[in-house]
Amino acid sequence: MLDAHKIKKDFPIFRQKFSGQPLVYLDSTASSQKPQAVIDAVSECYEKYYANVHRGIYQLSELASDAYEASRATVAKFIGATIREIIFTRNATESLNLIAFTWGKQNISEGDEIIITEMEHHANIVPWQQLTAEKKAKLHYWPITDEGRLDLDKLDALLNGRTKLVSLSHMSNVLGTINPVKDIIKKIRKYRSDIVISIDGAQSLPHIPVNVVDIDADFYSFSSHKMLGPAGVGVLYGKAEILESMPPFLTGGDMITKVTFEGAEWNDIPFKFEAGTPNIAGVIGLAAAINYLEDLGMDNVYQHEQDLTAKVFSELLKIDGLKLFGPKDIKDRGAIFSFTLGDIHPHDLASILDEQGVAIRAGHHCAQPLHQRFGIEATGRASFYIYNTDEDIKSLIEGLKKAQELFSL
Amino acid sequence: MSFDMYREIIMDHYKNPRNFGAIKNADGQATKDNPLCGDSIQITYSVGKEKLSDIKFNGTGCSISLAGASVLTENIKGKKFDEVKNYTDEDFMKDLTVPISPARRKCALLGLRALRQAMDIEQHEN
């Protein structure tokens, strides 16, 4: 069991007051807050051993390079990968774009087909729309049920001889649905073993234990800033043999072994995909975030959020006129709650909650097609993480009731 | 102004919008959307001699965008064309009389944006 009150003390931001009240932060799905350990790791890098990596002969550069590469090892171990399969990017969006711009351009041709789902974040839609438009390929959307789950039987109708790639999220950033990616991948592999499978793990990795080898994904993308780490760092995991076959993404320094006036030779993976000076301190901060999460234990993180989910559910469903999207069964569901409340516009909900120091998100959460699917423009979204307590749930419920009172026509 | 007074003005216009509806045989109309949240405001107007003789708004949205459009129609109705043309975002914010957080400013200004589009006035900021 996690002690969220104790955890909260590790996060300096919670010492601040908003609207004269303690901060109730319910927008970790957009970006998480940072513990002191992460802030310290970033500061320490700049204070004690900062220099560019992979270049200097001097001691300082070696220290920085060692810390940077040790962070890569930390990330690899966290998801069950090998070190050379971890590529640092700017965020999960860039990781997904990297796949589209390199593997995609090399392997997708006219008439080929890509499958994504109706529940994707724009980051896992637009790169594939662009790629299929450019290559005259087809993009299919795997439908979801009214409860916000993928309909496994409907996948059969979409798979065919031209299917080259399936890309889907591990956890929906709107519905909270945790997709059974291991079963899905097994099913796809059984159909045809050469279909490449990319998993958008931006929402799942911060909240549930993940082993990329166990689920057998070809690619797995995620962002540091959603998992307690600094913003500006993302990760792309790719199976080594696939990464080796791919052309580079951005070109320039560090990703080459040799440059002449005539051309260049590419460096080995993962460096082939890391052109230019990376976000050194950010990567080191991500490793500190992973250490923090591992100290808590990812099973405990998941259990804490399951407990919160059960409580939030029972409270939310008591509110008249509240419509909750996503699975009603808390199993295989994250602590992300998107909802509408009567006719109250989500922006008004968010503003009224903000007056009480409660931060929720309002809008389409970068998933407009999904909102279209449900025939709505926008929802309010409250999302929970390790530092959220029962009191936070209470503040949310009180805020929603207050909004209801104010807007009663 | 206290927060409750602010809320009272917004809620008053939200619940009892002024000049709500559409003018039949209007001299001009335009609709502006805020794609991020689905707000949509339509403005219709008719002109008299050198002035805006009537204006109405229609639409769906949050309390700030609807109240904003309502306050706008109240304040702009009967103004001369020159005055409408020179009516800035800041003028509107003053007429609204309530402080709007930066995040909601776009909502408040949606009606004015629609009016300017309807009258072919440049969307000058400030």
Image: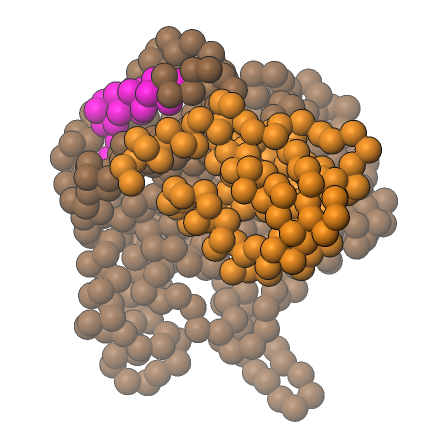
Chain colours: A brown, B orange
Let me know if residue A342 is in the magenta part: no
**Prevailing SS of the magenta stretch:** helix
Tell me: A402 left or right of A380.
left
Quadrant assignment, res A381: top left
- At x 37%, y 8%, the residue is A318
Quarter of the picture containing the N terminus of chain A is top left
Quadrant assignment, res A24: top left
Check the image and report above or below for A227 versus B15.
below
- At x 16%, y 44%, the residue is A15
Tell me: A100 left or right of A273.
right
The answer to whether residue B66 shows anywhere in this view is yes
Tell me: A104 left or right of B3.
right
- At x 19%, y 39%, the residue is A20
Q: Position of residue A176 (x, y in %)?
A: 47, 27
Number of labels in the image equals: 0
Q: Position of residue A141 (x, y in %)?
A: 71, 32
Residue range in magenta is A383-404
Query: In terms of depth relative to the viewer, which is nearer, A138 or B107?
Result: B107
Q: Position of residue B76 (x, y in %)?
A: 59, 44
Q: Position of residue A193 (x, y in %)?
A: 68, 37
- At x 50%, y 49%, the residue is B92
Tell me: B103 left or right of A247.
left
Q: For the view shown, which residue lies furthest in the bottom direction?
A: A261
The answer to whether residue A236 shows anywhere in this view is no
Let me know if residue A403 is in the magenta part: yes
Query: In terms of depth relative to the viewer, which is nearer, B115 or A348?
Result: B115
